[in-house]
Amino acid sequence: MEPEKPLEISEVQTPKPTGSEVLVKVKAVGVCHSDLHLWEGGYDTGDGFMKVTDRGVKFPVIPGHEIVGTVTEIGSAVQGIAVGDNVLVYPWIGCGNCSACRIGNDNVCDAPRSLGVFQNGGYAEYALIPHFKFLAKVTGMDLEAAASLACSGLTAYNAIKKSGATSQSNVVIFGAGGLGLMGVQIARAITNANIIIVDIDDAKLQTAKELGADHSVNSKDPEATQKIMTLCGGKGADCVIDFVNAPPTVKMGLAIIRKRGTMTLVGLFGGAIELSLVSVPLKAITIQGAYTGNYNEMVELLNLAKRGVINPIISKRYSLSEANTALEDLKARKILGRAIINP
């Protein structure tokens, strides 16, 4: 992959694992919005364009970070993982030395080495995993469905946990795409809060209600803000979780958040807003970011999926030669739930 160029299939030598490395034959790899940002070469910061190369990405790179597959070869120092194991790969690999990595939060490392971003990922027949500790065995559930748990599911799980939502909370979730739909299921499973889903697409809103949202509001409705306030008992949302994170959603989120509320921004849509600075201390609100999650959270999420508490939705499948089509479909909002590539 290189920015704004069609992805090309090329023959490369199959890597050979040594030491703690593991070779995984890729069964499926998720098609994620992060792949799209990588393909586009960066992010809209609101006052310019931040290139992924400024973050340390080097092209060409094999994208794909939501990887599931079967172990085909292991290095001599590998423990607890055997050839033939079905595994989910934790892709948010850190430097191992910074203060975040030392407490297991590789996902917010100062010098990340994430698979499919900073090093080759899973849009391939085989993926070399740098260390066996980044693998989780998948048993008792569909292997393909596990793919999205490494990123979209994990991101949603971390965001719901960080929001501090409880059964007493009014939770407003912006975005009923793959992330938001997973967020609804997770919020229902671990908080049992009053969940209000907000989106511009009625079909997606209906799916969100089927997956556990108590109420839905179409943000194109001129009365949307007032309707959300009413559904929150007139006081506003205790927790706003924005899986879109675009200027219109954040603006609406700030309008409906209650005193002492928490706003968790997740999506990478980009842009900028004007913020009334005095309202932040006067309302004592917390605005925080959430970025993927750590390995232990991925294992917790995998266990929820194994128990059937959450149900990852795979809606489209593509071959490796259709990778460009998959990214174009994602960009055109043609995918409900999650798409995967089957190399």
Image: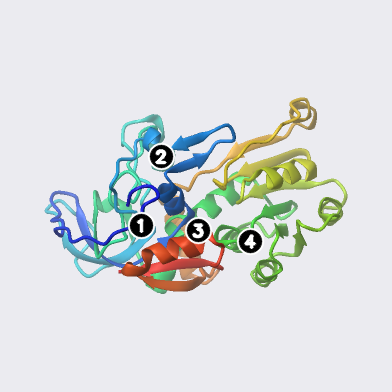
Asked if residue 168 is positioned above or below residue 304 in the image, the reply reads: above
The residue tagged 1 is 6
Instruction: Report the Cα–Cα distance between label 2 and label 1.
Output: 17 Å
Disc 1 or disc 4, which is closer to the eye? Answer: 1
Label 2 sits on a secondary structure element that is helix
* First of labels 2, 3 by sequence position: 2
Could you tell me the amino acid type at mark 4?
A: Ala
Q: In the displayed structure, does residue 191 sit left or right of residue 125?
A: right
Kindly tell me whether residue 305 is visible in this rendering. Answer: yes
How far apart marks 1 and 4 lie (CA) works out to: 28 Å
- The foreground one among 94 and 339 is 339
Residue corresponding to mark 4: 176
Q: Nearer the viewer, residue 18 or 202?
A: 202
Q: CA distance from mark 2 to mark 3?
A: 23 Å
Residue occupied by mark 2: 52
- Do tag 4 and tag 3 residues touch (Cβ < 8 Å)? no
Q: Nearer the viewer, mark 2 or mark 1?
A: 1
**Residue type pointed to by label 1:** Pro
